[in-house]
C-alpha cells in the first residue's frame, strides 16, 4: 500500500530539513514524498535541492495560501493513503508511517490519527503542550473535541468522494475537512494512543486575530455541513487547551 506524504512550505529554511529527515527516515518502504513550496526566497530551495533525488514530486510556485498548497499536493498524490506533515513538524520516530498503515489496514479503516506534542520553536525536544486526542465518539466535534490534523492519515478515495480542503477558509480548513469527513459522512476512523507528531509552537491560528478568524470559520464549518454546534464548544475548547499544558506524553 503506497503512502503519499505531503509537505507544504514557504520560507522554512530553519526547519524544513528536520521535517524532511523525519519523513525520509521512516522504515516503511512504499512512500511517495511530495513537497509543495510557495516560492521561497530564504534558502529553503537550496535545502530542497539537496534532497531532490529523494523527493518524488516537487512544486515551487506562488499559491493562494496553505490550503491551496495542500490541495495541490493531494491532487498530485498517487498513494492509497495521504498524510500531511508541514515544514515545522516532525514524526516522532521512524515507525510512525508503518504503525498508522497497519492500524488502517488491519481494522478496515478509512483514516486514523494519533496524539501530538507542541514543542518550543527553537527546541523540538522541549514539550510545551501535550494534545491527547482520545477515541472519537459521534457528536464529539460539536462539543469542542478536535483531532490534531498533522496526525491524520486518510485514504485518498475519501478525498475523491467527499472533497478537498475548502480554500475559502484561511485558518480552519483542516477542521472543516475533518468535520466533513468524520462527523458528516461518518468515515471509519481509528486512534493510535501515541504521540506521532511534534509541532513547533506558533502559527497563524495562535495569535489573537487568527483565533478570532478561526472561531468564525469553525462556526461556518458547522453551517456549511448542516451540523449542530453546541454553545459549549467555545467554553470546552479553551479549557481543553489549558489542560494540555499540564499533561505529560
Image (cartoon, rainbow, N blue to C red):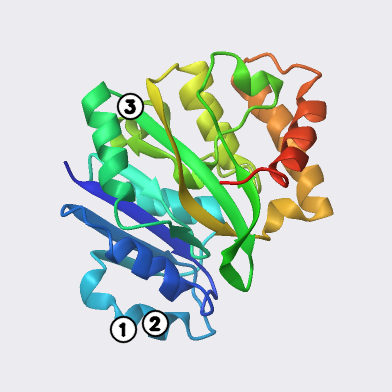
Q: Residues within 10 Å of mark 2 (few under 14, many from 20)?
A: some
Residue contact between numbered discs 2 and 3, judged by CB atoms under 8 Å: no
Give the x, y percent position of residue 28: 20, 52
Among the 4 quarters of the image, the one containing residue 7:
bottom left
Q: Is residue 1 left or right of residue 95?
A: left
Residue contact between numbered discs 1 and 2, judged by CB atoms under 8 Å: yes
Q: CA distance from mark 2 to mark 3?
A: 34 Å
Give the x, y percent position of residue 60: 41, 71
Q: Is residue 115 left or right of residue 92?
A: right
Give the x, y percent position of residue 123: 59, 71
Q: Closer to the N terminus: mark 1 or mark 3?
A: 1
Q: Residue at image x 51%, y 62%?
A: 63
Among the 4 quarters of the image, the one containing residue 85:
bottom left
Identify the residue under disc 3.
110
Q: Residue at image x 33%, y 49%?
A: 96
Q: Is residue 114 left or right of residue 95?
A: right
Amino acid at each position: 500500500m503506497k503512502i503519499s506524504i505531503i509537505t507544504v512550505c514557504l520560507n522554512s529554511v530553519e526547519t524544513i530539513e528536520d521535517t524532511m529527515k523525519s519523513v525520509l527516515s521512516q522504515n516503511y518502504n512504499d512512500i511517495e514524498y511530495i513537497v509543495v513550496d510557495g516560492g521561497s526566497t530564504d534558502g529553503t530551495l537550496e535545502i530542497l535541492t539537496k534532497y531532490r533525488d529523494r523527493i518524488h514530486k516537487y512544486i515551487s510556485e506562488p499559491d493562494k495560501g496553505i490550503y491551496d498548497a495542500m490541495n495541490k499536493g493531494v491532487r498530485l498524490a498517487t498513494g492509497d493513503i495521504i498524510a500531511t506533515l508541514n515544514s515545522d513538524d516532525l514524526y516522532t520516530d521512524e515507525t510512525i508511517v508503518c504503525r498508522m498503515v497497519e492500524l488502517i489496514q488491519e481494522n478496515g479503516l478509512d483514516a486514523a490519527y494519533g496524539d501530538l506534542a507542541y514543542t518550543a520553536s527553537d527546541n523540538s525536544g522541549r514539550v510545551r503542550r501535550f494534545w491527547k486526542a482520545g477515541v472519537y465518539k459521534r457528536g464529539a466535534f460539536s462539543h469542542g473535541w478536535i483531532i490534531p490534523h498533522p496526525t491524520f492519515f486518510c485514504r485518498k478515495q475519501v478525498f475523491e468522494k467527499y472533497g478537498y480542503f475548502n480554500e475559502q477558509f484561511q485558518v480552519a480548513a483542516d477542521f472543516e475537512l475533518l468535520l466533513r469527513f468524520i462527523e458528516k459522512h461518518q468515515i471509519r476512523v481509528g486512534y493510535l494512543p501515541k504521540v506521532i507528531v511534534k509541532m513547533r509552537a506558533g502559527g497563524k491560528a495562535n495569535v489573537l486575530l487568527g483565533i478570532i478568524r478561526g472561531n468564525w470559520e469553525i462556526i461556518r464549518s458547522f453551517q456549511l455541513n448542516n451540523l449542530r454546534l453546541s454553545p459549549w464548544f467555545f467554553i470546552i475548547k479553551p479549557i481543553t487547551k489549558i489542560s494540555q499544558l499540564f499533561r505529560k506524553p
